[in-house]
Image (spheres, rainbow, N blue to C red):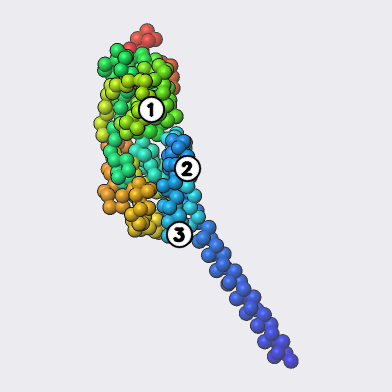
Amino acid sequence: MKTIILRRILLIQFLVLIGLLGTGCSDEKEDIRSEKLTIGVVSYGEGAISLDKYERFKDYIAKQTQSIVELEPAYNELQALEQIQHKNWDIVFAPPGLAAIALGKELYTPLFSMEASSGRQRSLLIVRDDKPIKTIADLANKTVALGAAGSAAGYYVPLYDLYGLTLAQIRFAPTPKTVLQWLADGSVDAGALSETDFELYQREFSTTKFRILHTSRWIPPAVVILAPSIERNQQQQIQKAMSQAPGDITADAGYVPLAKVPNYEQFIKLVEKVTPLEAQVKKTPAVLLNQQSANQQKVGGQAVN
């Protein structure tokens, strides 16, 4: 009788042990399946039209990595910059200005070039053709529209090109199209935006004739970048999946698996040079010198251009 009871106790203990092991395996699988990745893009408020092209990419990455993948748009570079600084985005389709900050300061990793969809671009300073502004120096004491912080063509590069001037005011446009709207209605004397955006939006202002005042140096292509919070094994998994993605998916998402990732070293240095000006840009007037130089050039309390 004692033998039978002992066997039953051992059997119960064995079944309990099996149950615990099964629960542990189940929990482990659940943890794997609950991995979450957030894809960040800048859509300039174009909503579903601009986000549709990322849907198949999102579904593909979710399947290949067995993760929950969410697509999160930002409607200008400033919103996107906050997400990058807080490491809220894991995979980012980053325009050049955001990429420079993410790679230079936030330790993101470049994965792929997006040069097929965006290519190298340049920043333009645009004025109305009926304005007597012929050179950058003529913008002294004028009002200039820039893009949001984080924009290469709309913010960092024009600040670099305008360095040394004192402007009456800098206004910050939420989108490139807004820059042209302000120029058309006379709210600003000049505005900065990319060559691509100028070609895209100028046709919507048929009653206003614009003129290119200045064309900048070339800006590197946009890149796909990965957050530093992604573990190495997961990074390799994501990179492999993106490398092997079907051509229609990579074309929609706008990256080129076989293209060389652009070298951002020089552009990061450019951004670092103009970053000290951010203390000046919101002031009126806006003295586009670093604080030490601005203090040296003050004469009798007045800034000298």
Whether residue 167 is visible here, answered yes or no, is no
Label 1: element kind: helix
- Residue that label 2 marks: 48
Would you identify the image quadrant in which residue 59 lies? bottom left
Inter-mark Cα distance, 2 to 1: 21 Å
- Residue that label 3 marks: 63
Q: Which of marks 3 and 2 is nearer the N terminus?
A: 2
- Residue at 42% across, 56% down: 60
Q: Residues within 10 Å of mark 1 (few under 14, many from 20)?
A: few
Image spot of residue 267 (x, y percent): 30, 36
Image spot of residue 80 (x, y percent): 45, 38
Which of the two residues, 299 or 64, is positioned nearer the viewer here?
64
Would you identify the image quadrant in which residue 98 lies? top left
Is 14 located above or below residue 68 in the figure? below
Q: How crowded is mark 3: few (under 14 residues within 10 Å), some or many (20 or more)?
A: few
Nearer the observer, disc 3 or disc 2? 2
Inter-mark Cα distance, 3 to 1: 41 Å
Which of the two residues, 171 or 232, is positioned nearer the viewer here?
171
Is 7 located above or below residue 18 in the figure? below
The N terminus lies in quadrant: bottom right
Q: Earlier in the sequence, mark 3 or mark 1?
A: 3
